[in-house]
């Protein structure tokens, strides 16, 4: 791990003729080059000619080295670079794979007599159980940081949800929406994907599960019918299913509403409750897919690719439809072969006619998320890619890279997909969506 205090100090000595802001920008570039090339800080610093003391020239030399592919394509990289500041105490411990067992279970007064509260008592006899008036009240005084986020699975909150049962999927400005609706059936996840956007929510005080799923059903009846709805926005839809037992109730509710579709989105293989009843075609069980080498590096504690596909096969044979999300796609060295193998494995293991949809989305993140990732996962391999700040303020690969990657992925998929499988891009602009027109 790079000692960023030391790095900043070395940069300030080498570039002592610049002010603090310029030194900060250079520190960020030197840091990212050092990581990307796996070389020593000194090697980068000493390779930069400083005789002319020209900030634009020095920055340009570093930018060219940090963004080799983009600059080789003639793409201008004109951003300002933010300070680098990494606290080693923020690193996530990545071994051994824990099973979820909270130390404390907080139960809101209104959720006290719920079946979920009873089950939690049976499943976690060693935990301390505490009554609270409300989650909001209990947590309002607590200020959280990355270290506290790393300990989030120590606390389980069982709550009585009163608002926010459903909301339209929040697209970024300028991207094509997919008409999705999110059911707020939990917050928090015990997996550790390095890119997880939940890390942005370092104000989440633990895992939060609602005890009153019947109120979600009531709210849905007065809600827009004929929608696509899912519960995987702020949690993994199935990872807690052995605790919540939501899936059988959701399946039964949607069985009599065939115009609407409910999606369970997961990286787990926690499907036993789903398999305890007959499947139905408007329930879609979906997995995100990535090459195993990427899962090993970046999706800690999740199920392996083979296990995900095996679980998908079981769900398909049981009467559910399946779906797959190639998201986030990361074009690492050798990615084409690796993703091609994933597509082969997918269609060898899962019947093509069970697949309701396949989405593609490339890695994207807010700038704040990047800072959290580099603190929590200093060994990550995703941040050395050449991402720039897009129109929506998020870091993304350049348009030309995204088009190229999507085109190649679509070429792989179109040979294998059934004609009824809907293929779409997640969080992409109209101009990028155009690659789909020629693909299918
Ligand atoms: S499975 Fe999803 S919610 Fe859980 S850590 Fe990974 S990205 Fe985040």
Image (cartoon, helix red, strand yellow):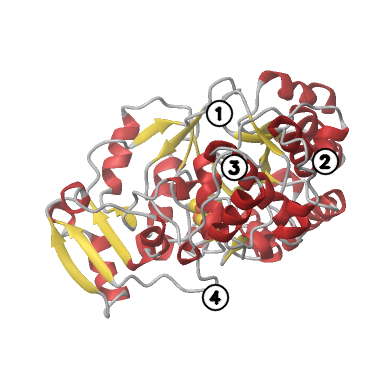
Q: Which is closer to the viewer, label 1 or label 4?
A: 1
Dot 3, crowdedness within 10 Å: few (<14), some or many (≥20)?
many
Q: Is residue 316 visible?
A: yes
In the image, residue 11 lies at what x, y percent?
63, 51
Q: Residue at x 68, y 49 (%)?
A: 30
Dot 2, crowdedness within 10 Å: few (<14), some or many (≥20)?
few
Q: State if disc 2 and disc 3 touch (CB < 8 Å).
A: no
Choose the circle earlier in sequence order: 4 or 3. Answer: 3
The quarter in which the C terminus is drawn is top right
Residue named by callout 4: 95
In the picture, the disc for residue 23 is 3
Would you say 345 lies left or right of 8 here?
Answer: right
Choose the circle earlier in sequence order: 1 or 3. Answer: 3
Residue named by callout 1: 393
Would you say 257 lies left or right of 395 here?
Answer: left
Q: Which is closer to the viewer, label 3 or label 2?
A: 3
Label 1 sits on a secondary structure element that is loop
Q: State if disc 2 and disc 1 touch (CB < 8 Å).
A: no
Q: Is residue 423 visible?
A: no
Choose the circle earlier in sequence order: 1 or 2. Answer: 2
Q: Which is closer to the viewer, label 4 or label 3?
A: 3
């Amino acid at each position: 791990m790079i000692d960023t205090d030391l790095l900043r100090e070395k940069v300030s000595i080498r570039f002592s003729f610049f002010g603090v802001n310029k030194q900060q920008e250079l520190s960020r570039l030197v840091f990212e080059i050092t990581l990307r090339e796996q070389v020593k800080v000194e090697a980068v610093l000493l390779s930069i000619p400083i005789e002319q003391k020209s900030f634009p020239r020095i920055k340009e030399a570093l930018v060219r080295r940090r963004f080799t592919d983009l600059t080789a394509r003639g793409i201008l990289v004109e951003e300002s670079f933010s300070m680098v500041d990494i606290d080693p105490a923020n690193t996530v411990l990545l071994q051994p794979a824990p099973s979820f067992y909270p130390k404390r279970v907080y139960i809101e007064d209104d959720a006290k007599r719920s079946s979920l509260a009873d089950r939690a008592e049976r499943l976690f006899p060693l935990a301390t159980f505490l009554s609270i008036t409300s989650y909001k009240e209990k947590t309002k005084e607590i200020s959280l940081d990355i270290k506290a986020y790393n300990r989030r699975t120590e606390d389980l909150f069982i709550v009585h949800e009163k608002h926010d049962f459903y909301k339209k999927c929040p697209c970024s400005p300028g991207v094509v929406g997919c008409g999705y609706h999110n059911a707020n059936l939990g917050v928090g996840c015990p997996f550790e994907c390095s890119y997880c956007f939940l890390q942005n929510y370092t104000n989440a005080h633990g895992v939060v599960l609602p005890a009153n799923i019947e109120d979600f059903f009531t709210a849905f009846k007065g809600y827009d019918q004929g929608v696509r709805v899912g519960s995987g926005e702020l949690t993994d839809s199935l990872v807690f299913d052995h605790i919540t037992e939501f899936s059988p109730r959701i399946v039964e509710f949607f069985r009599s509403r065939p115009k609407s579709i409910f999606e369970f989105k997961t990286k787990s293989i926690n499907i036993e409750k789903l398999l305890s009843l007959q499947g139905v075609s408007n329930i879609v069980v979906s997995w995100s897919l990535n090459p195993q080498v990427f899962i090993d590096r970046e999706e800690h504690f999740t199920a392996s690719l083979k296990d995900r596909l095996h679980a998908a096969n079981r769900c398909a044979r049981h009467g559910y439809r399946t779906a797959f999300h190639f998201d986030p796609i990361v074009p690492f060295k050798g990615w084409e072969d690796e993703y091609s193998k994933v597509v082969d494995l997918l269609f060898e293991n899962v019947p093509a006619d069970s697949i309701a949809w396949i989405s593609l989305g490339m890695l994207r993140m807010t700038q704040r998320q990047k800072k959290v990732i580099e603190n929590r996962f200093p060994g990550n391999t995703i941040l050395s890619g050449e991402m720039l700040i897009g129109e929506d303020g998020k870091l993304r690969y350049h348009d030309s890279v995204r088009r190229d990657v999507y085109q190649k992925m679509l070429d792989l998929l179109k040979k294998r997909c059934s004609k009824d499988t809907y293929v779409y891009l997640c969080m992409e602009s109209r101009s990028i969506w155009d690659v789909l027109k020629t693909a299918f």
